[in-house]
Each structure stands twice: as structure tokens, then as C-alpha cells.
Amino acid sequence: MSTSRTPIDLIAAAHEHRPVLEQLWTMFRHDMSAFTGTLPDETGRFRQERLDAALNEPGWSGYLLRLRQAPVGLVVVRGLGAHERVISSFFLVHGARRAGHGRAAVRAITQLHPGRWAVAYQDSNSVAAHFWAAIASDADENWTVEHRAVPGRPDLPPDAWARFTVR
């Protein structure tokens, strides 16, 4: 349940949103680098294939999150035509966290695309682990979590995959 008095706006990402999404993507990847050790390339940019796919590929979608008029986050989902949809990337700026905005955004997106959902996170990211467990248990009392190796990253501990169904 959202504790926020100001609702978050969920905007389907389009090419016109690319500049702001790229700014948010850099902040997201910077946050995640604390858990993955990923470094930016020689131009100071992080890889953004998932963001590109959200704007260009069938079965993928992206969302820009706004609070009042401020861009405060992004969500990338994939598998929209598959049995299981995946929240591939999720980010809120620090100033928008802990007010129910993240839960409200996930609830809105999963209700747009009801069915089976999955999201991966690192157990060492305790904030994400708590957040996704709360999201999954709110949506589905039979939610599960399993650990799987991170493809191409044998140096990382396995990802935790939370799975839940939204009706």
C-alpha cells in the first residue's frame, strides 16, 4: 500500500523520453555497480542494451516514472508476450524512495500486464531483497525465490529470482 500523498505517474517510454531515460539509466547503473563491480566504458557510460531494447524491441517495454513533473525513475520489462514477464530494471532516485512510490509503480505495471512475473536481485543488496520480497508477497501468497548463476559473471554470487503471479 502506498503511503505517499502524491501519486507517481507511469509514462510509457517513447523515443522522445530517451535523454531523460539515459540520465536515469546512468544513475541506476551507478547504484548497481556497488553490487556488481561494473565500471563505465572509456566515455564514462554504462552499457544500456536493456534500455535500448525497451525502446525498440517487441516484447519489451519501458516506463518513465514522474513525481509531480520531476523524472524520478524508470522500469524496463521484457517477456510481455511470454508466459513469464520479467522486471529487467527498476530504479527510483533516492529522494523518491521510502514513500510508497516504488510499490505503487510496480503494482501499476504488473496490473497492466497480469500474469506470472519474475525479478532478479543480489542478496547483498538488502534494500532490494526486502523490497522485492514485500512486492511478491503482497501480490501472491505463493511467491517463490530461487538462486541462479548470473550469466557471464562467474565472479558474482547467484542472483535471487523472486517469482509471483498478479491476477
Image (cartoon, grey):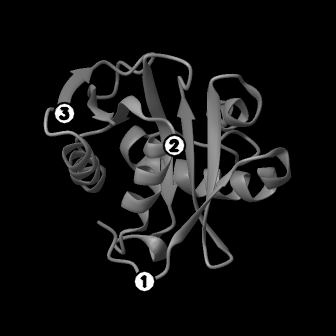
Which label's residue is closer to the chain start, 1 or 3? 1
Q: What numbered label is drawn on residue 112?
A: 2
Q: Is residue 41 above or below residue 116?
A: below
Residue 75 on image: x %, y % = 55, 47
Q: Is residue 163 above or below residue 66?
A: above
Residue appearing at x 21%, y 46% in the figure: 133
Q: Kindly check if marks 1 and 2 are in contact, taking CB atoms under 8 A apart as contact.
A: no
Q: Residues within 10 Å of mark 2 (few under 14, many from 20)?
A: few
Residue to which mark 1 is pinned: 5
Residue 34 on image: x %, y % = 40, 50
Q: Residues within 10 Å of mark 1 (few under 14, many from 20)?
A: few
Instruction: Identify which amino acid the numbered label 3 is placed on.
Output: Trp
The quarter in which the C terminus is drawn is top left
The quarter in which the N terminus is drawn is bottom left
Q: Secondary structure at mark 1?
A: loop
Instruction: Identify which amino acid the numbered label 1 is placed on.
Output: Arg
| Left or right, 1 with reference to 44 | left
Residue 85 on image: x %, y % = 46, 27
Residue to which mark 3 is pinned: 143
Q: Nearer the viewer, residue 157 or 159?
A: 159
